[in-house]
Image (cartoon, rainbow, N blue to C red):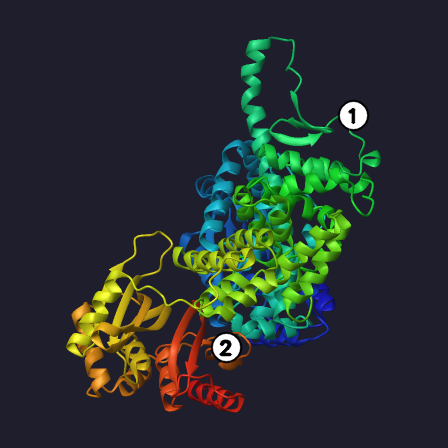
Amino acid sequence: MTSVEENTDHTADSGPSGYAAARLRLLQEESRSGPSRRSALAGLTDAWLTALFTTAVQETGVRGAALVAVGGYGRSELSPRSDLDLVLLHDGKAEPRALSALADRLWYPVWDLGLALDHSVRTPGEARKTAAEDLKVHLGLLDARPVAGDAGLLAGLRTSVLADWRNQAAKRLPQLHALCRDRAERAGELRFLLEPDLKEARGGLRDVTALRAVAASWLADAPREGLADARRRLLDARDALHLVTGRATDRLSLQEQDQVAAQLGLLDADALLREVYEAARVVAYAGDVTWREVGRVLRARAAKPRLRGLLGTRGAPAVERAPLAEGVVESDGEAVLALAARPDRDPVLPLRFGAAAAQAGLPVSLHALRRLALQAKPLPVPWPAEAREQLLTLLGAGEPTIAVWEAMEAEGLITRLLPDWERVRCRPQRNPVHTWTVDRHLIETAVRASALTRRVGRPDLLLMAALLHDIGKGWPGDHSVAGETIARDVAVRVGFDARDIDVLGTLVRHHLLLIDTATRRDLDDPATVRAVAEAVGSVGTLEVLHALTEADALATGPAAWSAWRGSLVADLVARVAAVLRGTAPAAREPEIPTTEQERLAVEALRTGEPVLALHARHEEDAVGVELVVAVPDQPGVLPAVAGVLALHRLTVRAADLRSMELPDLLGEVLVLRWRVAAEYGALPEAARLRTDLIRALDGSLDVPAKLADREAAYPRRRGVVPPPPRVVVVADVSALATVLEVRAPDAVGLLHRVGRALEAGGVRVRSAHVSTLGANAVDTVYVVDGDGKPLSPREAAALAGSVQAALS
């Protein structure tokens, strides 16, 4: 015990209070962190438990027993709130009552301190039998370490457990791999989660433990480069999380990330996530390589007995090597370098290797990648045509591109070829709509774009733009503006000509133009279409931009694209193409109403009341149902309809408001088209919606009061405080109306409050366009004054301020 005290500079007596005080002092030492603190905490705990064990043995008279640490404690990796995983081993000779008393004297002091304890009492034979039946127990015993008592008991057990593990590797390792896959399916991929589980998610601490177990089998071993450092970083993050929260948690919640970052001396939460993602990437890649090697070895072992029977004493045949490309062959299910390959004389070989592997749908050999990383000659700048073609072949291979690209990136080949990639590697995206980090999103976009190459005349520009469209997210400012500059530099490096460089710059600069305009602007306003045409410049560029927009949205996440969004973008593209070809109508033509809209409008004018229709959407990617409402033109329509929808727990995903003139009936009707989804439960009946809408318009239903009651009954849950709403006047996008853009957290009754503020401002809503992405809403409204004209700059600014005040 003296050595422990000297090592930790802390003294713990055998009582709980002494250990607790020493433990607290250790955790509060700012100079002690990381592996040093974990080791010191384990040593301090060892000393305390040894004293408890010694006293307990003296009191109970039990002999032939040992206290054993397993799992993380067995590895001397105690985080501040880690469980203590302990086994009380005994030789089976003690009386059951005495043995029970000994266990009580060990477990109760641990519980009294509020420490989590995973414990068992077993003989070595029982422990071995349990390990044979329970994979998790077997894994824990691989890291068993003596704490106190008869060390010989554990020595014999360890020898048996390790021998069993190695002898049963053909059975145990597939079970372990299945366990890892199931866990990854439940917990997700650590390096892409905004609130990752540092232990359970793929690439987390559980996977590191699994790799240690594979190595202990002597069947295969994980790539060692960077793995120890990745493990340390994940453990450091978990330590900081425990200290910040005071809880035994492994989930890095959003609200704790800034504090955890500060605890680790990092700049902010983004720096923390990037550090964690980098570590997870290393672990996940090591796992991919290791499990592939395990599979190869097990297949070879299974085949050997059959081959011996067929070949007698002649031995196994040589492994076939099928050519894939110059210097690249397939061998044993992997892409490898040909025997005659010379990376030092062939600078295009890394790209040719990756392209050939992806085209063949093969994993890449770790040995081949490391040889390329070590020996490959740098490409000249600009690249030769073959290098550019091989890059585009790699990007256009579809789904297999992802695994090949990530393997090349893990070995440093991608950043050597494209230095600007370094800034987006493992970079988090805080928008919950995004599924991936920036780097993975770019590759996912290229994969999506590869399926759209038949739609465009320049598939090479589409694939390159997909790879580069968000490359500016590694720089300050507007990522589209920064990205244009970087994309032009990369295009020069890769060897595109001046005209193609200009097109790539335009595609990256305006990669959000079509989706933003289609969902937030009035497409019937000639200024909208002209502005897009001027930005794009040519029909060929528009064609590629259309495909890039779809690929980008599909690679973002399920909330970013739908049949409805696709139809809006396609409509905008058709209008812009007509302008670019010089065939667009000079004057704005009124929208032709559908038969149903005309029927509803006629009914609304005839009855003087709102009428509506609900339509279920059957497309796989459509959200909820379509609701069409026709109302005789009158004040308060927008807030009334939005408020009624909110009261019926209908979430507005998209909306469009337009006026329709019916000269034959001498009247004007407002037609509102909504995409709505029920928060939970079934959709309300159309008749109930209509009744409440009539009451809201005649004032007998107090919508604001009802919404306030609902908010009071269901307060917002604790979480990250979103940024405040922002309302801006969007200049120079319409000559017919003033355009306000509202960006705010999506909330109950948001559009109702916007509508009320506009009504209070004395303006008429000419059209409205609602778009909801994840937890954020972007609502665009076109408003005019009482005479149907745009507002003056001063009036527009005042109105924007009033709407923002109403939302705040």
- In this view of the protein, which residue sits in the foreground, 422 or 156? 422
Q: Is residue 76 visible?
A: no
Mark 2 neighbour density, 10 Å: few (under 14) some (14–19) many (20 or more): some
In this orientation, does residue 243 appear? yes
Please name whichever residue, 706 or 180, is drawn nearer the observer in this view of the structure: 706
Q: Is 172 in front, or is 719?
A: 719
Q: Position of residue 423 (x, y in %)?
A: 70, 60
Q: Earlier in the sequence, mark 1 or mark 2?
A: 1
Q: Which residue is drawn at the image coordinates 56% and 58% (left, top)?
A: 580
- Specify the label residue 340 is tagged with: 1
672 is higher (above) or lower (below) than 702: above
- Write the residue at 46% across / 50% down: 185
Q: Position of residue 632 (x, y in %)?
A: 24, 78
Determine whether the residue tagged by mark 2 lies in a helix, strand or loop: loop
Report whether 614 appears left or right of 33: left
Q: Position of residue 638 (x, y in %)?
A: 32, 79
Q: Quadrant of residue 530?
A: bottom right
Q: CA distance from mark 1 to mark 2?
A: 68 Å
- What residue type is disc 1 on? Ala
Of residues 757 and 238, the one nearer the viewer is 757
Q: Which residue is mark 2?
A: 735
Image location of residue 150, percent across then percent down: 59, 50
Above/below status of 734 relative to 619: below
> Which quadrant does the C terminus fall into?
bottom left
Residue at 64%, 27% (x, y): give it.
330
Secondary structure category for the residue under label 1: loop
The amino acid type of the residue labelled 2 equals: Ala
